Image: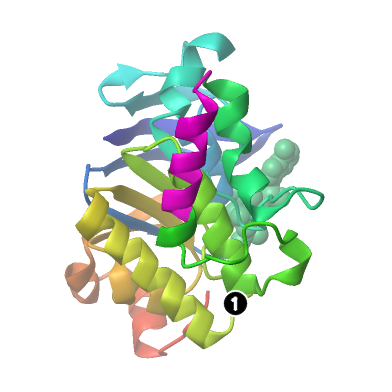
Amino acid sequence: MIELRNVTLKYGEKVILDKVSLTVQDNTIKAVLGPSGVGKSTIIKLMLGLIKPNSGQVFVDGVDITPLKEADLYPIRRKMGIVFQGNALFDSMTIAQNMSFFLRENLRLPEEEIKQRVTEQIRFAGLEGYEEQLPESLSGGMKKRVAIGRALIFNPKMILFDEPTAGLDPVSSRKILNLIASLKKSNDLGAVFVTHIIDDVFAIADEVSVLYQSKIIFDGPTEQLHNSEHPFIKSILSDKILEL
Ligand SMILES: Nc1ncnc2c1ncn2[C@@H]1O[C@H](COP(=O)(O)OP(=O)(O)OP(=O)(O)O)[C@@H](O)[C@H]1O
Ligand SMILES: [Mg+2]
């Protein structure tokens, strides 16, 4: 479980998040929906302990990670897989090397076990036959699946996605969303994904937090979003704006 409790985050004098609280339960898909520049990637960075809040706390499985030193954050981060917006693949490494990189760097596992985990993820991501290719030869959707496979390689309980469908065509988007939903069912995984695309939220999110002007203006089950009286939410739903 990940919880932000009363988190305030400033860059310089500018308040990005103002007393933001939200919880991501295990085995639940939670979306954080908000317009461009509102602080969505900042929320992901806070959850990983990559940045610290000015005030408030971030809990991972009940542990307040805000006072932790870098070395103590490593085991916490290993509970979470992360898929960056641009995938952050290593251009000069093959697909198999991309997937095994962090495993090899961080855990001193026998080579046999590394191979086995990579084979599992290649199969899961539907990338058999592409093991020895470089990322540049893959489509956008396939690159995203490599990044997801790499994020799963530590067997995390939770996976964090920064804009998982940004830049993908509708068919590839749908495939990635289905993959995220299937992770919850088949691997008991929880997921949090930040997005500006409302359709993605309705497609797979159990719960949604809406971030607007530094504050959470809705937090609850996705199907209850329609009941919100907040003018911003009413306008995005009634105008059928697909992207914020
Ligand atoms: N290191 C930084 N220093 C100063 N300002 C920053 C820094 N990182 C982000 N910001 C600003 O903080 C705000 C929130 O940034 P963030 O990247 O979290 O937004 P976002 O919702 O992910 O945006 P996008 O939709 O563009 O991905 C933006 O106004 C951004 O310009
Ligand atoms: Mg962002």
- In the displayed structure image, the side of residue 96 where residue 198 appears, left or right: left
Q: Amino acid at mark 1?
A: Leu
Q: Which residue does the image show at 44% across and 41% down from the upper left?
A: 116
Kindly indicate the quadrant of the structure image that contains residue 134.
bottom right
Residue 37 appears at what percent x and percent y?
A: 63, 57
For residue 217, above or below residue 100 = below
For residue 141, above or below residue 99 = below
In magenta segment, residue 107:
no
- In the displayed structure image, the side of residue 144 where residue 207 appears, left or right: left
Q: Which residue does the image show at 58% across and 39% down from the upper left?
A: 100
For residue 11, above or below residue 208 = above
For residue 180, above or below residue 59 = below
Most common SS among magenta residues:
helix
Secondary structure type for disc 1? loop
Q: Disc 1 designates what residue? A: 168
Task: In the displayed orientation, state which residue is furthest to the bottom.
Answer: 239
Task: In the displayed orientation, state which residue is furthest to the right.
Answer: 92
Q: Which residue does the image show at 47% across and 67% down from the upper left?
A: 126
The stretch of residues the image draws in magenta is 108-121
Residue 183 appears at what percent x and percent y?
A: 31, 57
Q: Which quadrant holds the N terminus?
A: top left
